[in-house]
Amino acid sequence: MPTSIRATGEDKDMTLDELAEFVETARKADVPGDNPVRAEVSTSGKIKGIEVATDADRT
């Protein structure tokens, strides 16, 4: 099992639908709801990629 789930925008920046799909995938993988989500953002502030640990994130 991967130690994290990662998603990126198909056209560089993520869309709301892509973000929703990421959350649905994380929920199906039983990722703890209190795990922090790490994001890579563009200089314009748009989300380019996100990642969450699949188990309890202790860092």
Image (cartoon, rainbow, N blue to C red):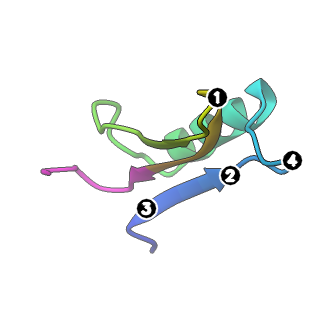
Query: Mark 2 highlights which residue?
Result: 8
The front one of 51 and 55 is 51
| Mark pair 2, 1: CA separation | 16 Å
| Vertical order, 51 against 21 (above or below) | below
- Give the residue type at disc 4: Asp
The front one of 10 and 41 is 41
Q: Please tell me how crowded label 2 is: few (under 14), some (14-19), or many (20+) other residues with Cα within 10 Å.
A: some
Dot 3: element: strand
Q: Residue at x 40, y 39 (%)?
A: 37
Q: Please tell me how crowded label 4 is: few (under 14), some (14-19), or many (20+) other residues with Cα within 10 Å.
A: few
Please state the horizontal and vertical placement of residue 29, each as a whole percent of the image.
Answer: 50, 52
Tag in front: 2 or 1: 1
Query: Mark 3 highlights which residue?
Result: 4
Instruction: Of the two numbered discs 3 and 1 on the same chain, state the one appearing first in sequence.
Output: 3
Please state the horizontal and vertical placement of residue 57, each as a whole percent of the image.
Answer: 22, 50
In the image, the segment drawn in magenta is 52-59
Query: Mark 1 highlights which residue?
Result: 44
For this view, does 36 lie left or right of residue 12? left
Dot 1: element: loop
For this view, does 32 lie left or right of residue 2? left
For this view, does 54 lie left or right of residue 10? left
